[in-house]
Structure formats: C-alpha cells, structure tokens
Image (cartoon, coloured by chain):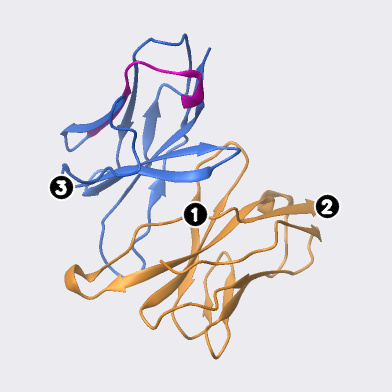
Chain colours: A orange, B blue
Amino acid sequence: DAKTTQPNSMESNEEEPVHLPCNHSTISGTDYIHWYRQLPSQGPEYVIHGLTSNVNNRMASLAIAEDRKSSTLILHRATLRDAAVYYCILREYMNYGGSQGNLIFGKGTKLSVKP
Amino acid sequence: DARVTQTPRHKVTEMGQEVTMRCQPILGHNTVFWYRQTMMQGLELLAYFRNRAPLDDSGMPKDRFSAEMPDATLATLKIQPSEPRDSAVYFCASGLGQGKRNEQFFGPGTRLTVL
C-alpha cells in the first residue's frame, strides 16, 4: 500500500472548522482514501472514505485534490469530543472479491480541541 | 447497537505466564482482525481471519503467539509464554470483508501488562 504523510499534531478551537491534511503522492489509480479516528482509550472508528470526488457524511467531509496526491478531512465545527488521533489510510481496491486491502495505520494526526 | 466485545479489558500478568484474549465479532461479520498498539510502533496488524480461516498471520511472532476462531462468534489470541515486551493494547476488529467501504469495527481493546 502507498504511504501517507500527516502532521503529527494540530490544534483547534471548539466550534471552529478543522482541516486535517494528508499527502499521498504515490497513490495509485485503485487506491481509496480512508480516514479513521481513535478517541482516547478507544479503538479506531471509521470516519469517511473516497476515491476521486469530494465526499460528505454526518461526521465529516473529505476533499480530494484533482491529482489525488493529497486530501483533506474537514470537520465543520469541532467539538471537544472530536479530540482524537486521525489516520489517513490508502487501501487498494481489488476487483477480484470486491474488497480492499487491509488497514495499515501510520502515526496519524493528534487533534486537540480547545474550549 | 451491534459492537465488537473483548475480554478481559485489562490484564496484568507475570513474565512466562499464558495470556488468552477473547473477542466476539459483530454477528454476521465474516472477517476478524487482531491488532496490537504500542507507543513506539503504533497500530500493527497481527493476524486476520475470513470465514474462520486464517488468511494472514505474518505480523504475529509465531513462536509465542497463536490466533484461532473456534466458532463464528469467538476469536482468541493467545500468548505463551508472555514477555514484558508484549505489553500493549490488543484490539480486535470485525467486518464484512467486501465492498468499497469495507469498514472495520473495532472493539474497546485489552490492555495487557506483563511484569
């Protein structure tokens, strides 16, 4: 799986938007971009994923660069509960079996949210 | 509210003792993963199963670790003999193993301390 690069840490103020960047310059055409987050003392949880187009769900938005070499996870209004480590992960989509490669976690970005 | 459950949540043991960690995947999920998380190495995939068959255990030290799925509702990870360097949080995750989202659902983890 191609590698991703994320800042080690970021800070945000409560109720403000947060943009978490991820670089993946060696992404291949069959790689999906997944984001997971890990709240303190919990297991990781799925946030969002995408391929080429921007994606929105109830948790966040994912903005993908046109060349797909970078992406940004957007939390529209950060809350204290959003303080977590956010992982950007590339997963190869395998047409055979219709599944993706396993999750390979990097160090992620530790997001702190100030009240 | 379907969740992955893990027992025990905490385990303190002495070097040389056998440790068994248990995981109950979400009903209907056919893929089960074991991860280990430490401060130094982050989250690492140890092994995973599909339809109860081991598919990949290359991340697991074979001499002391073993993973099994006696039935579809139980996965076990055993360490014998345990060593201080095995101290970590062990996460189990389950999923359907297919589709572009292919989400993995993580349990709360077992925090293992080997003295």
Q: Mark 2 points at which residue?
A: A114
Disc nearest the viewer among 2 and 3:
3
Q: Are marks 2 and 1 on the same chain?
A: yes
Q: Label 1, secondary structure: give it.
A: loop
- Tag 2, which secondary structure? strand
Q: Which amino acid does label 1 sit on?
A: Phe
Q: Name the kind of residue labelled 2 in the image.
A: Lys
Crowdedness near tag 1: few (<14), some (14–19) or many (≥20) residues, C-alpha within 10 Å: some
Query: From this viewpoint, which residue is outermost toward the bottom?
Result: A66
Position of residue B88 measured from the top left corner of the image (x, y, whole percent): 51, 29
- Please name the amino acid that badge 3 sits on: Asn
- Would you place residue B20 above or below residue A59 in this image? above
- Residue B79 vs B3, above or below: the answer is above
* Numbered tag placed on residue A22 in the rendering: none
Q: Depth-wise, is mark 2 or mark 1 nearer the camera?
A: 1
Image mark 1: chain: A
- Residue A105, labelled with which disc? 1
- Per the rendered image, the range of residues in magenta is B74-86
Chain for disc number 3: B
Residue A15 seen in this snapshot: yes
